[in-house]
Amino acid sequence: MARVLVTGAAGFLGSHLCELLTDRGHSVIGMDNLLTGDIRNVERLSGRDYVFVKHDVTNYIHVDGPLDRIYHFASPASPIDYLKLPIQTLKVGSLGTHNALGLAKAKGARILIASTSEVYGDPLVHPQREDYWGNVNCVGPRGVYDEAKRFAEAMVMAYHRYHGVQTRIVRIFNTYGPRMRVEDGRAIPAFLSQALKNEDVTVFGDGSQTRSLCYVSDLIEGITRLMESDEVNPVNVGNPVEMTIRQLAETIISITGSSSRIVTRPLPMDDPKVRQPDITRARAILGWEPKVALREGLEPTIAYFRERLGI
């Protein structure tokens, strides 16, 4: 069994990753500065082989003893966060990634970084393959996240090529499930919060922009498979089933039995018009593809949001 460090451990994805790793018998150190993470997400790990360390990874990272694996997930990840925290987002993608890679080099550990479909920007190629270089506005408001992740990928490959560090890069597409923050700002948390309170459901633009939604358990399984694979180049992990934002809003209103109506607002600057992963590489290399259908995954997600909202 491995000794593993997870940065961003108290976040939505990080907490699910910590849970799966401890389920499999690994010894896990969770690290988070709780800027956007929630300590309640990892309180359930009490009694397992798990230790939480509150630390900002943009500062030097020290871990006593050996490390076998590092999952670098620390970063604001929703537009509402990285528009409010632009400097912190850039710093964790650059300084935080540099520190995590330095730790991996010092410990002889394998490191996987959580990159994002946002490296493709507002894509001109559809669906998005890993060999597509993207269409990113580096000086736009979303550039702080997009370019932080693109820089992180470049630094990972530099450490791999120059220092021989064992590195992995996962490009994560839209993911949902329990432990998303109610005020997250992304489509599913926003639509669920509004629909469960019978408020107007806000769709940006005309709702024709598309997203591909992967349930969290599927995503985490794909990520752990990538870590244990021999693949160094980036791999898309996400659900290739594409739907429009309006269809998603209508589905959530229907499932929740809400009386909400859909209202529209102007589309934010540089908001991607399409988003769909080509997962050919994940299927071939990892033997992975998502299994949880949207309606199946929405059931526990809705139950979680009902509990958090007290409804």
Image: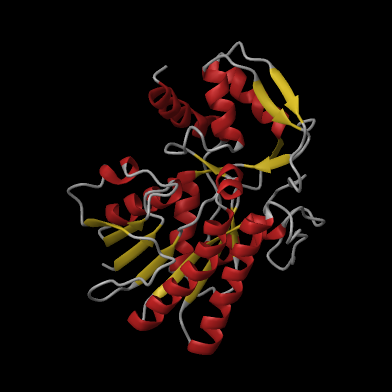
Tell me which corner region of the image, top left, top right, bottom left or bottom right, holds residue 235.
bottom right
In this view, 138 is above or below 18: below
Position of residue 233 relative to residue 79, above or below, is below
Tally of numbered tags? 0
59 relative position to 184: left or right: left
Q: Quadrant of residue 150?
A: bottom right
**Quadrant housing the C terminus:** top left
Judged left or right of residue 57, residue 206 is right
Q: Is residue 278 among the parts visible in the rendering? A: no
Is 107 on the left or on the right of 239, as rendered?
A: left
Q: Residue furthest bottom?
A: 162
Q: Position of residue 166 (x, y in %)?
A: 46, 79
Q: Which residue is rendered at x = 56% and y = 58% of the image?
A: 87
In-front residue for pair 244/113: 113
Identify which residue is drawn at 48% across, 59% down.
223
Colour theme: secondary structure
Instruction: Check the picture and name the quadrant holding the N terminus.
Output: bottom left
- Which residue is outermost to the right? 124
Q: Is residue 170 above or below residue 140?
A: below
Image point (73%, 45%), residue name: 271
Q: Who is closer to the viewer here, 146 or 187?
A: 146
- Residue 12 position in % (x across, y down): 44, 45
Question: Residue pushed farthest top?
Answer: 259
Res 297 seen here: yes
Front-most of 234 and 181?
A: 181
Question: Residue 180: x, y in percent?
Answer: 47, 38
- Measured as percent of width and height from the top left, residue 44 is found at 26, 42
